[in-house]
Amino acid sequence: MKKENMGTDQLAALGLTVVFASLAVGFLAIGCGQQQAQSTKTERGTIQAADAGKAPAVANTAASATEAQGETPQSGQTESIIALPPDVLATSSTDYVTPGQIVEITAQGTPDVVEVILKDGRGKTQPLVYDEAAANWRGHYRVPLRPATDRLGLSVTAKNAQELQHRVWVFLQVQEVATETAAPDSQ
């Protein structure tokens, strides 16, 4: 009879554990849902109040359009719009370079881009500066005097206010510098 009580007691304890675990998971899910809704509202306010001095006006046009009509977008639709990384297109002033030459790198990004970074893979990182008149990002890169290969790959990474990023590559073909050898005077 003692063994039957032990089995029943263990079964009851297991049942209570399952019930409490289910309740705990339920409360956590409800709490996370409320927190996510609050953060979505906060992010939207932050995006619309972004500093327009150093980058293009950062605004969610789809959210602004629906708010102007007095409608609120469905939460799934808003989250998917906000969660998109920016788009960027980068070019260099020339495709063929010589060691020591300075090259201008230009990047054109979507309006939600707030920062563009140039990296050369050799440890050199530099931000590009937004040119409001041309509506694009610009920076200069000096080709190393002794490049490791005859083809340099520069990564250009654009970031938006949500820290989502998109990377593209610009490749430069390094040409040998023609060295003039002076012929000895034979007089």
Image: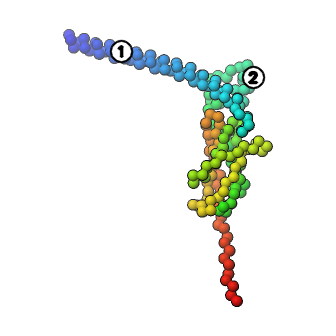
Please, what secondary structure does the residue beneath circle 1 have? helix
Residue 84 appears in the rendering: no
Of the numbered discs in the image, which one, if any, rests on residue 15? Answer: 1
* Quarter of the figure that contains the N terminus: top left
Q: Residues within 10 Å of mark 1 (few under 14, many from 20)?
A: few
Of all residues, the one furthest to the right in this rendering is 133
Q: Amino acid at mark 1?
A: Gly
* Residue at image location 50% in from the left, 21% down from the top: 29
> Which of the 4 image quadrants contains residue 180?
bottom right
Q: Amino acid at mark 2?
A: Ala
Q: Nearer the viewer, residue 98 or 80?
A: 98
* Quarter of the figure that contains the C terminus: bottom right
Q: Nearer the viewer, residue 72 or 37?
A: 37
Q: Position of residue 102 (x, y in %)?
A: 69, 57
Q: Nearer the viewer, residue 131 or 72?
A: 131
* Residue at image location 53% in from the left, 22% down from the top: 32
Of all residues, the one furthest to the top in this rendering is 1
Q: Residues within 10 Å of mark 2 (few under 14, many from 20)?
A: few
Residue 149 higher or lower than 186, as above or below: above
Real-space Cα separation, disc 1 to disc 2, in angstroms:
52 Å
> To which residue does mark 2 refer?
68
